[in-house]
Image (cartoon, rainbow, N blue to C red):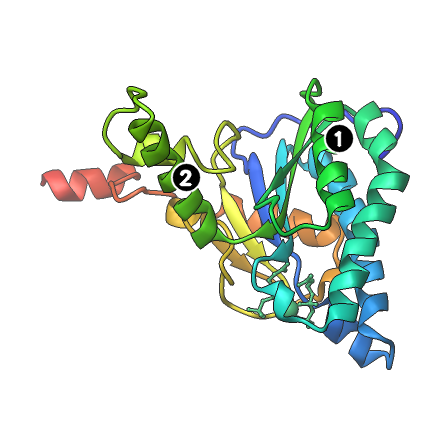
Amino acid sequence: MPAEPQKPSPAPDGPRHVALIMDGNGRWAQARGLPRALGHREGVQALKRTIEAAPTLGIQCLTVFGFSTENWRRPVEEVSDLMGLVRTYVASDLKRLDRAGVRVRILGRREGLPADIADIVSRTETSTAHNDKFLLQVAFNYGGQSDIVDAARRHFERQRAGEAVGPLTEETLGAGLSTAGGPPVDVIVRTSGERRLSNFLLWEAAYAELVYQDILWPDYGAEALADVVEQYRRRDRRYGGLASGADVARAAG
Ligand code: IPE
Ligand code: IPE
Ligand code: MG
């Protein structure tokens, strides 16, 4: 991220919001005979390159999957390496992100996080809350299913407490998700060749475009992200309707 934020180029065709499943750190390291931890460390460099490139491609929001609710199943050393990277990344990059006008939001459950990480999460959100040039959402201790369950639970708790929350609808539930208030997800990208969501943004994926790239996350950067934008712009998002004139004419005639 440069000290002076680059002006986003106008992008009438989007995507505005790109969500990334940053996968393949372990395989990147393994292929080089290195410990997995080094793959994660390189993954942080790839994240920095990607955040820097996003505004130049007209992207206004990035959501990245950093740690899933299922990643606790990994060996304790690896979990602790990943937590350690959060500490060093925030310590080294928060000021730069803030200067560039980036608002950082953390998606996911705070319970279960080591106390100092939960504290870093809150401080990061508070100290960048005033920024509006770019939104960076980091899904950490995040699971799409638990996010939906949490939103539903909060809805019924407020109802039990006597609040006029109204019926549970797509709108009221959606408003309780950790992504609420941000722009809709235009495209979900998964790197490393795997073709699954692994519990990422399940609700938000409803009409998002899906892009799979064979590149391992530590090799990611501006070029790969530009390819996502190009692929996205060739898609026809119909949301169940008939978008193109030809389709409408055919349906009518
Ligand atoms: C993604 O890389 C990072 C996290 C899940 C935290 P992986 O660690 O899953 O890498 P692979 O899939 O084993 O190669
Ligand atoms: C998803 O990747 C989680 C993150 C990228 C943080 P995983 O590597 O954990 O997913 P699976 O286990 O291959 O489905
Ligand atoms: Mg993986």
Indicate which quadrant contains ligand 3: bottom right
Location of residue 96 with respect to 39 vertically, above or below:
above
Mark 1 or mark 2: name the one nearer the start of the chain. Answer: 1
Quick one: which residue is furthest to the left in this view? 253
108 relative to 145 in the view: left or right = right
Q: Position of residue 215 (x, y in %)?
A: 69, 65
Q: CA distance from mark 1 to mark 2?
A: 23 Å
Q: Position of residue 207 (x, y in %)?
A: 38, 46
Q: Which mark is residue 151?
A: 2
- Label annotation for residue 123: 1
Asked if residue 49 shows in the view, the reply is no
- Note whether residue 205 is visible: yes
Compare residues 185 and 252 and report the one nearer the observer: 185
Q: Residue at x 27, y 36 (%)?
A: 245
Write the residue at 78% across / 44% down.
Answer: 116
Q: Residue at x 49, y 58 (%)?
A: 199
Name the element at disc 2.
helix
Classed neighbour count for the residue bearing mark 1: other residues with Cα under 10 Å, few (<14), some (14–19), many (≥20): few
The image shows a total of numbered marks equal to: 2
Give me the disc on residue 62: none
Q: Secondary structure at mark 1?
A: helix
The amino acid at mark 2 is Ala
Residue 231 percent across, percent down from the top left? 54, 51
- Which residue shows up at 24% across the image and 41% down it? 241
Does the closest atom of ligand 2 sit within 8 Å of the Cβ of label 2? no
Is 55 placed left or right of 235 in the picture? Answer: right
Q: Looking at the image, do the residues carrying marks 1 and 2 touch, with CB atoms under 8 Å apart?
A: no
Quadrant location of residue 41? Answer: bottom right
